[in-house]
Image: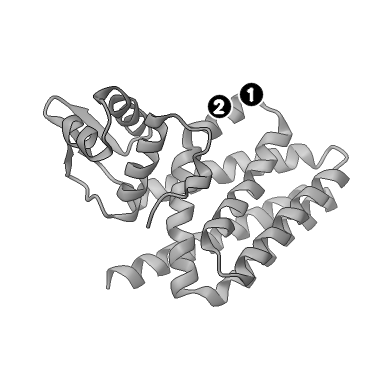
Amino acid sequence: MNYPASWLQSASLGEKMASDIRLQIIAGTIKPGTILSENQIALEFGTSRSPVREALKKLSNEGLIELKRMGAVVLGLKQKDIEELRDVRFLIENFAVKRLSMRDSEELVKKLNYIIDKMEMAAKHKDAVDFAYQDLTFHETFIVEVDHNRIGHMWQGIRDVVLTALLVATEKRFTYYSEEIGHLINRHRFIVEALASKNREHIEKAIRAHYEDTRKTVSKISDETTE
């Protein structure tokens, strides 16, 4: 699996390198405990060590590696990490959607339904890459629209890890559980309907149901691919 080039059009070389290494770590190609050498990475990418340092610093800030004197030690993305990311996403999104429900949401509902239409098109063409991107865009739209600086900073701190993990999970979902794609799309519609209802309990129920479904599917995928 390669990191989609279309997602990196305005990225620096260091960011591109971080994206590639991040994907390999989250996909399990680079195992926990592996030591990453600046010189080795620079040689593989055909670049100087400066962008390598940028990439490793970013991955360290994300908690995927630990920088030590002998090199960068890969920590990986454990099940506990995945659950914590899901918890943070739920808290952020639940706050954002409830806040947005107090405003005129007609245009936002149109925008979200348009994104879901794109997800349906990606599913029809079995395009896991675009499906994952539209899935993230759907959830990110709430965070952007709520226009809350601190929430925005929190989101940016986990965004790249979330997007990469979502890409890996979506690829596996399309392979092992493609029959659940339609249900996932319906869950997104349910969230939009909840937003339009302006009912806070309905909103939290819709978001919680979505993240609970995600938890169950990720657990099944993990069992399937490790047997």
Residue position marked by numbered label 1 in the rendering: 149
* Residue drawn at (44%, 48%) of the image: 164
**Which quarter of the figure is the C terminus placed in?**
bottom left
Nearer-the-camera pick, 177 or 167: 167
**Is residue 199 in view?**
no
Q: Are marks 1 and 2 in contact (CB under 8 Å)?
A: yes
In the drawing, does residue 49 fall left or right of residue 206?
left
Q: Secondary structure at mark 1?
A: helix
Residue position marked by numbered label 2 in the rendering: 153
Q: Secondary structure at mark 2?
A: helix
Mark 1: amino acid:
Asn
- Whole-percent x and y of residue 187? 66, 63
* Residue drawn at (78%, 48%) of the image: 111
**Which quarter of the figure is the N terminus placed in?**
bottom left
Q: Spatial distance from mark 1 to mark 2, Cα to Cα?
A: 6 Å
Mark 2: amino acid:
His
* Residue drawn at (17%, 44%) of the image: 34
Hey, which residue is sitting farthest left in the picture? Answer: 70
Nearer-the-camera pick, 4 or 187: 4
Hey, which residue is sitting farthest front in the picture? Answer: 46
- Whole-percent x and y of residue 112? 75, 51
Nearer-the-camera pick, 153 or 37: 37
- Whole-percent x and y of residue 106? 88, 46
